[in-house]
Image (cartoon, helix red, strand yellow):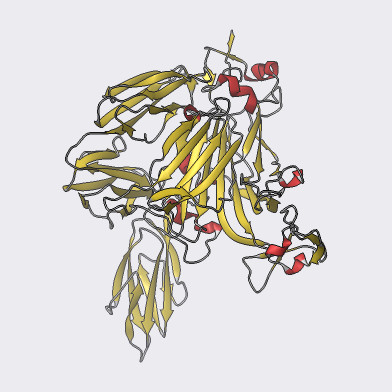
Amino acid sequence: MIVNTHVSGFLQAPARAFHRLQYIPLLLALLAFGPQGAVASTAYGDLNNFDVVNDTGEECHGFEIEIEDVHSTDITYTYDWNHFGAPRITEDNSDPAHPRVTIRYESAQNADGSWAAYTAVPAAPLTPTDGHMCTNPFVNEGCEHFGVGYYGAPTAIRYNWLVDRGGALVHHSAPVLVATPSWTYWPPVDVQPAVAVAVIPAPVVEIPPALEFGEPVFVKVIKTTTHNAADVALRDLVSDDVDGDGFDDWQNAEPAEVEAEFKLLQANLGGDPAKEELPGAEDEMGDGSETVTRRYEFYRYAAAVDTLDGETGEAMCDEVDPTTNPNNPQYLHGVGTAVGVTDAFGDTYYVDCAAQTVVGEYIGAQMAGFDAAMPLGLVDHLQDGEKDVAYTPRSLVVGGNSPYEIVITGSLPVGLTLGDYTDPDSGTTSHGVLHGTPTTAGAFSFTVEATDADNVVASNAYLLTVAGLVAAPQYLLVVETFGGGSGTVAGGGIDCGATCDVLLDGGTEVTLTATPAAGSVFTGWSGACAGTGDCVVTVDADTGVSATFVPDTLRYTLTVAKTGSGTVTSKPKGISCGKQCDHAFTVGTTVTLTAKPARKHQFLGWSGACSGTASTCTVPMLGDQSVGAVFD
């Protein structure tokens, strides 16, 4: 019998396996998994997605994530559905002992030097329930959603908005106060279940000279109360119920509860270890097949500036009174009536924290997942290359059990190889990595099919452009499907599921047709098209189209608001307003509403999903709908 090396063989970085699993005795870990049929190495994976509010006060044109002490080959999935698209990944090995990987989302520049994409300044403070605003790239209300998965155990992760300074994108001076949890995992043994513990640290920020503390932030921790074995993709870790199952997608269809509320965190130089991180409770994972998901919400420290200690920078009003301020119910006050604060000259004065608003505006949320055995998959997109410039080594095949069998249909750019890659600094060999130096410019379309040691198969199609070719302008048409149902979109070279993006000559007109699968309903287009008919789009720039399919069992609510004396009834039955003014109809139902004025009254007209003054109107139930009816 041969024992599967789940712990001693770590998929991308064997030498770093014990850094993550430092508390697991090797013998215990091996026995916990029992006999297996083949030697393979299982990937342990973190997935981290976050909403981040643009609180800089100016339009931003990108976002950058810096990860310390990992290699580019340790990066797995990235979340690419935002205003800036797929990021550019680079690795800095100026200190070989401490590599740094940068994941940079940035706007393209127009010919006149202006920026093609931006993140707006919010018109009003956003709330944690506004997550759908962050995950929909077709609206721009002041927040974005980014994400990255990785192997290994980074020592620090920094986040920065990118702003325009003289035609170049640089870090905004204010730090982004979100943080990434670190995980510790114990495999199952005997009758004890597997356990994962997530610890959320203070955000990594620069501590001002001569002070001991960086900028403070409040964090709220929400966790699922149970776990299941359903795989969690990076694009599912969002603060919105995209699939319509009644749970925000990060919950993985499990109920959630608040674990810790309004804990103040503040990076410091050892003056107060309790503020350096918020320990997490143990999450049991059964036999190790379950997935743990958690959500961390971040809020500004809003107390007056004189509550920061002048000598150390420590936030002194660090507790929260759960009683809501009736004059401003979004914010909460501190605790204590005589908190001592030292000013910059060493004098002490006292602050009434109970009179201070300490929890400020919501600034973002981190949705994190841990999978003890990441399923086999392929990354969604690849960054473009440049002729005769080394391509950043990129893990294209991730998860599963190596070694992989890889089949490529189509052509890789000349000079690039997909397979094993040995890092020249660490000597670590990674599998399923795209690397090399492209020697020919052009647009290269290819499909990758990977089979792991357990005979699990994954495939994906890619388009990789290598700069340097002068040619007629071409643009990318990308189709995405959403909604929790299933169906296909076809036309103009698109056949999505299988092929969801295509490169087309500028000016090409494409007709896309959405076909729902059995048990699903097509509810409409978004992006470059709208409505429910065929989508006709002229591709004269990079273009995105979204199609929504939902289960045909889904029900949407029709609500009637009536003014004056009269009744509104529906066919099929359900609405009889006055008495019953709302009803849930099955998706796809066309509801006919009839308005009947009372004696000596007249019907003046409809509003909302209906219009005009005819006594009847029809409402297609492709989402929740509201109708107004006025009698006089």
Q: Residue at x 29, y 29 (%)?
A: 387
Name the foreground residue: 564 vs 240.
240
Is residue 252 positioned above or below 621 on the image? above
Is residue 408 positioned above or below 508 on the image? above
Q: Residue at x 55, y 57 (%)?
A: 128
| Circle count | 0
Which quadrant does the C terminus fall into?
bottom left
* Residue 604, visible in the rendered structure: yes
Name the foreground residue: 418 vs 31.
418
Farthest residue to the top: give it.
1
From the top left corner, tell me how far across and down residue 481 is, in percent: 35, 45
From the top left corner, tell me how far across and down residue 333 is, in percent: 71, 65
Which quadrant does the N terminus fall into?
top right
Is residue 577 positioned above or below 5 on the image? below
28 vs 3, left or right, is right
* Residue 79, visible in the rendered structure: no
From the top left corner, tell me how far across and down residue 400 is, in percent: 48, 24
What is the quadrant of residue 504 in the picture? top left
Farthest residue to the front: give it.
345
Q: Residue at x 52, y 18 (%)?
A: 428
Q: Residue at x 29, y 71 (%)?
A: 617
From the top left corner, tell me how far across and down residue 284 is, in percent: 66, 35
